Amino acid sequence: MGRRKPIQLAWGVRREGRSLWTRNAVKGVSVRDERRKKDSRIEWRYWDPQKSKVAACLLKTKLNPSEIIPKSGSTCLYLGASSGTTVSHIHDHVCGSGNHHNGQIVSVEISPRMMRDLSKLSESRPGLIPVLGDARDPMVISPYLRNKVDWFHQDISVADQTKSFLRISDFFLKDGGIGMLSLKAASERWVEGGDDSRFELAKKLIESNSEVTLIDNVDISHYEGQHRVFIIRK
């Protein structure tokens, strides 16, 4: 059989079979030793779904992935950025080399250790703004945003993640914007019935909010155990 033809999901994101790749904004450099390859003048970086819940979601969603990838030049918010692996792939597409798309990704992380890596990453990636602080606090986030966001992702391991996610959506997500909540069942408060009951409670909380519409509920346990991604549109 011949090689599968890549499917362009967005300017800087493409799918090849069951793998995702982003158009490397810093040629010749890997962020976490991921594979790179060239196609003519363009260098692509492998976006590993085992290391990125967003990548896992794009591979597993029943939606067209193009609907939930932020557009190039968007204003984005990433809560729980860790050392910046997923953020770097979002940056490849939203900002591009030298931020020629004029995108913005405000990336919030509470761990000083992870922030050192994230800050180092931002030095070679204009448009990526690292913020040390509590991702649940709008006052930590607001000074860095140029306007309401087109897209945001929340991945923080604290109780009541869903309530925090909806609160941040209310503050910062623009009408028509996309929000993604990566929810780890073990981080939520105990409820009878285990993981499924926790996920069902999160689903009900989102559906009861009149300001947003739940457009997909993605089981990514194949890549990341005890996790689902809830995708909303404002």
Image (cartoon, rainbow, N blue to C red):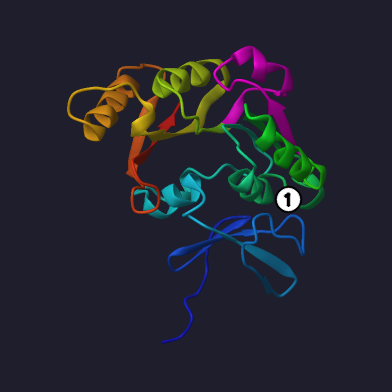
Q: Position of residue 178 (x, y in %)?
A: 49, 33
The outermost residue toward the left is: 193
- In this rendering, is residue 86 above or below 76? below
- Residue 62 image offset from top left, x and y in percent: 33, 49
Q: Is residue 164 left or right of residue 218?
A: right
In this view, the residue farthest toward the front is 113
Q: Residues within 10 Å of mark 1 (few under 14, many from 20)?
A: many
Q: Which residue in the structure is indicated by mark 1?
A: 96
Is residue 102 placed above or below 170 in the rendered structure? below
In the depicted structure, whether residue 171 falls above or below residue 119: above
The quadrant where residue 194 appears: top left
Q: Is residue 234 visible?
A: yes
Q: Residue at x 64, y 43 (%)?
A: 84
> Which residues are drawn in magenta?
127-150
| The quarter of the displayed image where residue 135 is located | top right
Along the line of sight, which residue is nearer the eye, 178 or 218? 218
Q: Residue 230: where, in percent of width, then height?
A: 38, 35
Is 149 colored magenta in this rendering?
A: yes
Q: Which one is nearer the viewer's eye here, 71 or 93? A: 93
> What residue occupies the far top of the structure in this picture?
139
In-image side of 206 versus 129 (left or right): left
Classify 19 as above or below 116: below
What residue is rendered at 58% in x and 46% in y? 86
Q: Amino acid at mark 1?
A: Gly
Q: Does the magenta run of residues contain 176?
A: no
Q: Residue at x 74, y 37 (%)?
A: 116
